[in-house]
């Protein structure tokens, strides 16, 4: 994430002893420029807009409701992803930071299909087919079929059931999806520089 160029006008300045995970760049931010909302009438309540020193973007924080907008960036960037996979993984991460947990799980489920197709599976098959394809072609670590199938099942639940997906489930599935992407793309991509023709 590039740093926004420019200066925020009329900000307060000083060390706050406050830190948060920036929802834009993912860095741990300890801001020194901010706007505080005065007059809440509730003792010990701090609400304000804080400027991330890494990317220069604003985040709203409310210590009374434990609210952060945009929310913290969940998951890590993964290197060597094909373009469509990279975009879909970013979408799954961004959905969590805006509390769109069902959408995040649906993106993780769709990633299973896209990963399989980039590795040679035929498009237009069932999600169960793609889970089996990943396993039979050694694209998932040993003893991981249950996890991959869990992503598929939770995606089915998000698609066909009335209740929404909970935050804990979305974060858990995103974590496993990240591991799968590391295994399928990043680790082999890192080895490319050591391969000889």
Image: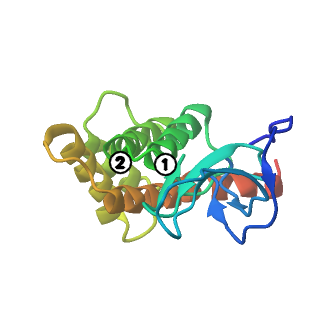
> What residue is rendered at 34% in x and 63% in y?
168
The residue where tag 1 is placed is: 97
Note whether residue 63 is visible: yes
Q: Quadrant of residue 130?
A: top left
Q: Nearer the viewer, residue 164 or 112?
A: 164
Coordinates of residue 1 in the picture (x, y in percent) = 74, 43
> What residue is rendered at 13% in x and 42% in y?
162
Coordinates of residue 69 in the picture (x, y in percent) = 53, 47
From the viewer's perspective, is 24 left or right of 110? Answer: right
Crowd around label 1: few <14 · some 14–19 · many ≥20 (10 Å): some
Q: Is residue 60 above or below residue 66?
A: above
Note whether residue 54 is visible: no
Q: Is residue 90 above or below residue 153?
A: above
Coordinates of residue 176 in the picture (x, y in percent) = 44, 61
The residue where tag 2 is placed is: 101
Q: Nearer the viewer, residue 34 or 111?
A: 34
From the viewer's perspective, is 146 left or right of 186? Answer: left
> What residue is rendered at 36% in x and 71% in y?
143
Q: Nearer the viewer, residue 163 or 193?
A: 163
Coordinates of residue 136 in the picture (x, y in percent) = 37, 55
Cα gap from disc 1 to disc 2, whole angstroms: 9 Å
Q: Secondary structure at mark 2?
A: helix
Q: Quadrant of residue 2?
A: top right
Label disc, if present, on residue 56 of the rendered structure: none
């Amino acid at each position: 994430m590039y740093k926004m160029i420019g200066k925020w006008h009329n900000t307060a300045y000083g060390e706050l002893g406050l830190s948060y995970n920036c929802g834009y760049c993912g860095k741990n931010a300890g801001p020194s420029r901010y706007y505080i909302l005065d007059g809440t009438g509730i003792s010990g309540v701090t609400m304000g807009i804080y400027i991330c020193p890494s990317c220069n973007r604003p985040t709203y924080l409310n210590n009374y409701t434990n609210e952060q907008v945009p929310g913290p960036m969940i998951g890590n960037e993964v290197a060597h992803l094909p373009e469509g996979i990279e975009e879909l993984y970013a979408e799954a991460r961004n959905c969590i930071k805006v509390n769109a947990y069902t959408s995040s799980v649906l993106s993780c489920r769709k990633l299973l299909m896209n990963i399989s197709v980039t590795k040679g599976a035929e498009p237009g098959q069932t999600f169960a087919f793609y889970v089996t394809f990943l396993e039979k072609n050694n694209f998932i670590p040993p003893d991981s079929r249950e996890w991959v199938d869990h992503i598929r099942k939770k995606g089915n639940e998000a698609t066909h059931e009335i209740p929404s997906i909970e935050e804990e489930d979305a974060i858990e599935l995103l974590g496993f999806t990240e591991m799968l992407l590391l295994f399928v793309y990043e680790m082999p991509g890192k080895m490319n520089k050591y391969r000889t023709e």
